[in-house]
Structure formats: C-alpha cells, structure tokens
Image: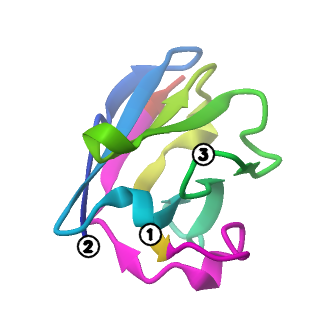
Amino acid sequence: VQLVESGGGLVQAGGSLRLSCAASGRAISNYHIGWFRQAPGKERELIAAITWNGGNTYYADSVKGRFSISRDNAKNTVYLQMNSLKPEDTAVFYCAAQIGGPGYYYASAYAYWGQGTLVTVSS
C-alpha cells in the first residue's frame, strides 16, 4: 500500500487543520492507520490511531481532546482533524499502516509509511 498525506500548512495558534491520508495500491480497509509526528530534534511519536473498521481509536495524552482521527474506507482515506493547535504541535506529520491485528496502538507495528506533511503553528 502507498500512502500520501496532505493538508499541512501554516496556521495560527488556536486554529484548526485537517490532514488526509490517501491510500493506493490496496484497500485501506485492510489496515489499521496511525498518525505520527516528528518535531525538530525529537523522536517520531504515535499520536493517534484507528483500527481497520474504525471501531477503536487511540490518542496520545498530548493531543487527547483536541485531535480526532476518522476514516472513510469507501474513499480509501483516513483523516486527522486537529483543533486548538499549539506552537508545540509544529512537526512533520506522517500516516502509517499496519495489517489489522491487536497492536494498532503499538508504534513499532507500523510498516508502511507516507512521506509526511509539515504543520507549522505560529504563536
């Protein structure tokens, strides 16, 4: 499966963005999808994940209550709605896929990656 992120950009603190992760090559419905981010000088971290059928989600504490992950398998796309953005959310955001199983909230289980999209939040 190939993944392409879009929707990044520059936004003021308190603003919103919606990222999209579009899949090709195979149906996204076969995969759990995670959103990761990597800020300058920091390790990449899993911030949100959704199971193949959308039945379960995971959020890191740093984004809980502000970010929402969803999926539309008919459109082969997963979304990350980001509200109340903060300057510390500035990062490159990646989506990644793993074949469905019990480990959708395990960062190390993700095997297929997009190229990333940059989100910059200004103060």
Q: Which residue is mark 3?
A: 54
- Residue 63 on image: x %, y %: 72, 40
Q: Which residue is mark 2?
A: 1
SS under mark 2 = loop
Q: Which residue is mark 1?
A: 97
Amino acid type of the residue tagged 1 in the rendering: Ala
Amino acid type of the residue tagged 2 in the rendering: Val
Sequence-first disc among 2 and 1: 2
Amino acid type of the residue tagged 3 in the rendering: Gly
In the displayed structure, 120 sits above or below 102; it is above
- Residue 42 on image: x %, y %: 59, 69
- Which quadrant, please, contains the N terminus? bottom left
* Residue 118 drawn in magenta: yes
| Residue appearing at x 54%, y 22% in the figure | 123
* Residue 98 drawn in magenta: no
Q: Residue furthest left?
A: 25
Sequence-first disc among 3 and 2: 2
Front-most of residues 22 and 64: 22
In the displayed structure, 7 sits above or below 83; it is below
Q: Is residue 38 visible from the viewing direction of this image?
A: no
| Residue appearing at x 55%, y 19% in the figure | 13
Q: Which residues are magenta?
A: 99-120
Instruction: Please give the label number shown on residue 44.
Output: none
